[in-house]
Image: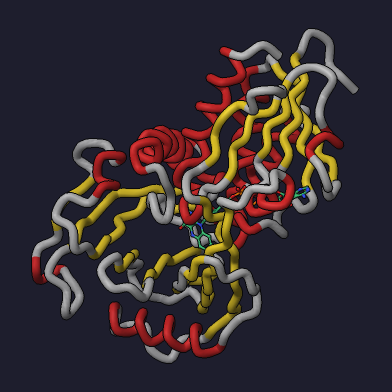
């Protein structure tokens, strides 16, 4: 039921992008928010993410820097004030080839330092220690859902064949359907970026977060409470969600090479997620309708969600609902 004096806002999509957008609008107290999605946590792609703050596989870069920087600030604040959100700050060692990597501009001053040679794994000559938000995705998404419910946001499970099915009579529809937007918007610019993950038993070792951005084969180690997340793969235009054993074997071998403490691990779970890739994130108002599109965040949904939600907010304030 519509709450009086509030502007209706329908969010299509219940992954990190839809939930974060809904959170920002609901928090203002000025919108009557409903989220419609085929699936909610724990069944979204967002649940499969690692997830570390890292602008990866996302375009355009300048926009991504602005969104990433805004999201960094929000996540850092959550880490400091709301530990139950599953967000905390960690030291990530990013192995690099570029002396001035593009993501550095999105990190606040004083949060990055170049690693000394003796701090690098064998075979590497450049790396940076970066203080970044680490998001325990299952905890964070559940926390978001609970916070939204507390603010009176309604959740409705429905698979849409067309966005018009939930187009409100007044107010806005925000399209945050991730990869689903390929069909809903007949968008040929969308493509899946397939990613494998092996979750191994949490280790009784001091945590070490490593992300290898040098070699073509993706390798990362992100310790989490529910198990250490080892990755990964990133194959554009592959949309199978079946786990390929040789890919998992490759991940385990590459991670053990990066951190020799990681031998003979007990694998708890293996899975494949499909990142919603796009030539560039679509964040714009539909010229003829009260629809704002917010999809195609590739490998960086958690890294940019809050900054994107802020831009959706700006569009909603300047348009005429
Ligand atoms: C292996 C892996 C590792 C990753 N690691 C990181 C990381 O470390 N850091 C980071 O920032 N990002 C990471 N990502 C990327 C991140 O997960 C994505 O960018 C993010 O989840 C996209 O969020 P989303 O809300 O757009 O999509 P989704 O989570 O897919 O949500 C889409 C929503 O839309 C709904 N929907 C779709 N179609 C329809 C329809 N027709 N009708 C109704 N509802 C519909 C779905 O049900 C769902 O609720 C990773 C991804 C993968 C796969």
> Residue at position x 77%, y 46% from top?
37
Residue 272 visible in this rendered orientation of the protein? yes
Between 275 and 223, the residue placed more toward the observer is 275
Report how many numbered discs are placed on residues in the image.
0
Residue at position x 61%, y 81% from top?
243
Q: How is the image coloured?
A: secondary structure
In the image, taking residue 19 as reference, residue 86 lies left or right, namely left
Determine whether 149 is above or below 182 in the image.
above
The residue under the point 58% across, 49% down is 140
Task: Please say whether residue 80 is visible from this viewpoint.
Answer: no
Q: Position of residue 95 (x, y in %)?
A: 24, 65
> Which residue is pictured at 34% across the width and 64% down the height?
209
Q: Quadrant of residue 74?
A: top left
Vertical placement of 219 versus 225: above or below? Answer: below
Figure check: 310 above or below 318: below
Above-or-below relation of 24 to 237: above
Residue 175 image offset from top left, x and y in percent: 68, 37
User: Quick one: which residue is furthest to the left in this view?
Assistant: 117
Residue 204: % across, % down: 41, 76
Residue 121: name its quadrant. bottom left
Q: Report the front residue among 108 and 183.
A: 183
Residue 30 spot, x, y in % from top left: 69, 14
Quadrant into which the C terminus falls: top right
Give 43 or 57, whichever is nearer the viewer. 57
Which residue ends up furthest to the right in the rendered image? 1
Left/right placement of residue 64 relative to residue 308 reads: left
| Quadrant occupied by the N terminus | top right
């Amino acid at each position: 039921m519509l709450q009086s004096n509030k502007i209706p806002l329908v969010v299509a999509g219940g992954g990190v992008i839809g939930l974060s957008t809904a959170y920002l609008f609901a928090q203002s107290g000025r919108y009557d928010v409903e989220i419609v999605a085929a699936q909610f946590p724990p069944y979204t792609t967002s649940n499969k993410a690692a997830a570390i703050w890292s602008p990866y596989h996302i375009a355009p870069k300048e926009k991504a820097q602005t969104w990433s920087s805004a999201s960094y600030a929000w996540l850092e604040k959550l880490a400091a004030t709301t530990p139950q959100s599953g967000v905390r700050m960690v030291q990530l060692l990013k192995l690099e080839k570029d002396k001035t990597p593009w993501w550095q501009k999105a990190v606040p001053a004083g949060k990055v330092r170049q690693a000394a040679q003796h701090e690098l794994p064998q075979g590497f000559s450049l790396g940076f220690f970066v203080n970044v938000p680490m998001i325990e995705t299952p905890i964070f998404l559940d926390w978001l859902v609970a916070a939204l419910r507390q603010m009176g946001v309604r959740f409705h499970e429905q698979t849409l064949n067309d966005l018009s099915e939930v187009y409100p009579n007044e107010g806005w529809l925000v399209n945050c359907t991730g990869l689903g937007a390929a069909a809903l918007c007949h968008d040929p610019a969308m493509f899946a970026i397939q990613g494998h993950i092996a979750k191994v038993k949490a280790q009784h070792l001091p945590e070490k977060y490593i992300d290898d951005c040098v070699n073509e084969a993706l390798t990362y180690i992100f310790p989490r409470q529910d198990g250490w997340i080892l990755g990964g793969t990133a194959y554009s235009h592959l949309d199978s969600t079946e786990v390929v054993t040789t890919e998992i074997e490759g991940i385990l071998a590459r991670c053990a090479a990066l951190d020799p403490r990681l031998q003979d691990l007990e694998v708890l779970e293996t899975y494949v997620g499909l990142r919603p890739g796009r030539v560039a994130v679509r964040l714009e108002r539909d010229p003829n309708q009260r629809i704002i599109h917010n999809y195609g965040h590739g490998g960086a949904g958690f890294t940019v969600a809050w900054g994107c939600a802020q831009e959706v907010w700006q569009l909603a304030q300047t348009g005429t609902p």
